Image (spheres, grey):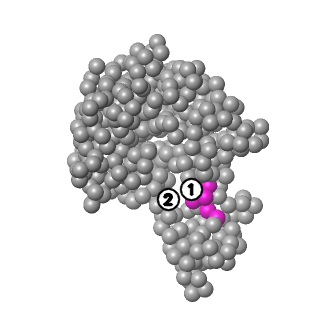
Amino acid sequence: MAPPVSLTELRLHHLRCLSAAELLPHPRLNLITGPNGAGKTTVLEAIYLLGRGRSFRTRHTEQLIRRETEELWVAGRVAGPAAERPAAAASGDGPGEAGAAGAAEHARHTVDLRCDRRDGIEARIDARPVGSLTELSEVLPVQVIDPGIHRLIEEGPVRRRRWLDWAVFHVEPGFLHQWQSYMRALRQRNAALRIGSHGNPMPWEPELARLGEALTTARVRVLEALQPYWSQALDELQAVPATITFQPGWPTDLPLAEQLARQRDRDRQRGHTGPGPHRCDVILRLEGRPVREVISRGQQKVLGAAMTLALARYVAVVAGHLPLLLLDDPAAELDALHTERLLSAIGALGAQCIVTALQPDSLGARVPDRAFHVEHGGVKTL
């Protein structure tokens, strides 16, 4: 198994209810305790910001800025193989790009992010402004299991696309560039469609089809390679034996180019492009039926945790870096058996893990390597 990525230092200012805090996490199991509303989850959000450029609770980062202040600031030091940055990181928005495999085992970098109410987000790696927030994940790959993990199963395809693309991002060279180029072509075709009969979407269709087929091939390849890790995660967590398959975003009886031509008039009426990888989905079924129709909310949470665990192990093996894992009060979301199994699986994985809980004994007999307590707008080491 690949060495883990390790966040060795975290500092933050004016993030939600926390005015200032500094933590030195342990490379393995860390526990953050405190009363409800004290800021435990906020610490996890700060870490997630450094690795993803956004919160896992809201898309609007400015909402994280503490009241009566104008900006928030988060900074961290990262050690591990994934901290070795690619020679030239691409710019723009998209799922990400491979480039960390084979990195130096003890690479170290600093990451910091500011969000101003007026000017938005600015992130830097080693004091250099990033061209895209996706560069952050090259340095600090992070996954989270939070109270909303069931939405991976219960809601529409957007979250599942993001889940899959995070893995494709780390193991498929060129994926980011292809995604960015596809989205530019998609915006151009959609603009032509919205003009109505005066617009001509056809010039964008060959590029859209070429890139769409390439993106789909990469996604299919990763999901197929992920299957044994998915089976292992289901077994480790004693989850329901759900299957996980790929739906490309258009009927597979015709190539994407022909689907775009066939749907052109309908797309013009709707003002946007229907078929394509921007509508792909990851389908989970149990005995042939969509799992969200046949399992409980608790079982959905276990499946969501299994999806996260499978992805972390797959990226560790294939891309060469083991992500940092954040667990937001798992004992409140999972029963004692599944909480213990999840912590045991993460322990066997060897990942750095940061867990929040109301009480110090929430981990059962498991003893954290380092513990912190959040209260009164700050964090202290126990």
Instruction: Verify whether residue 163 appears in magenta.
Output: no
Residue 321 shows up from this direction: no
Rendered residue at 58%/64% (across/down): 210
Residue 55 picture location, percent across and down: 40, 46
Label 1 residue SS: helix
Rendered residue at 28%/46% (across/down): 66
* Disc 1 + disc 2, Cβ < 8 Å: yes
Numbered badge on residue 162: none
Residue 359 shows up from this direction: yes
Rendered residue at 30%/40% (across/down): 17
Quickly name the residue at label 1.
Answer: 215
Residue 143 picture location, percent across and down: 46, 38
Q: Nearer the viewer, residue 97 or 149?
A: 149
Residue 25 picture location, percent across and down: 31, 27
Q: Residue furthest right?
A: 287
Q: Nearer the viewer, residue 114 or 257?
A: 114
For the record, the magenta segment spans 275-280
Height in image: 201 above or below 153? below
- Amino acid carrying label 1: it is Leu
In the image, taking residue 76 as reference, residue 320 lies left or right, namely: right
In the image, taking residue 296 as reference, residue 163 lies left or right, namely: left
Quickly name the residue at label 2.
Answer: 178
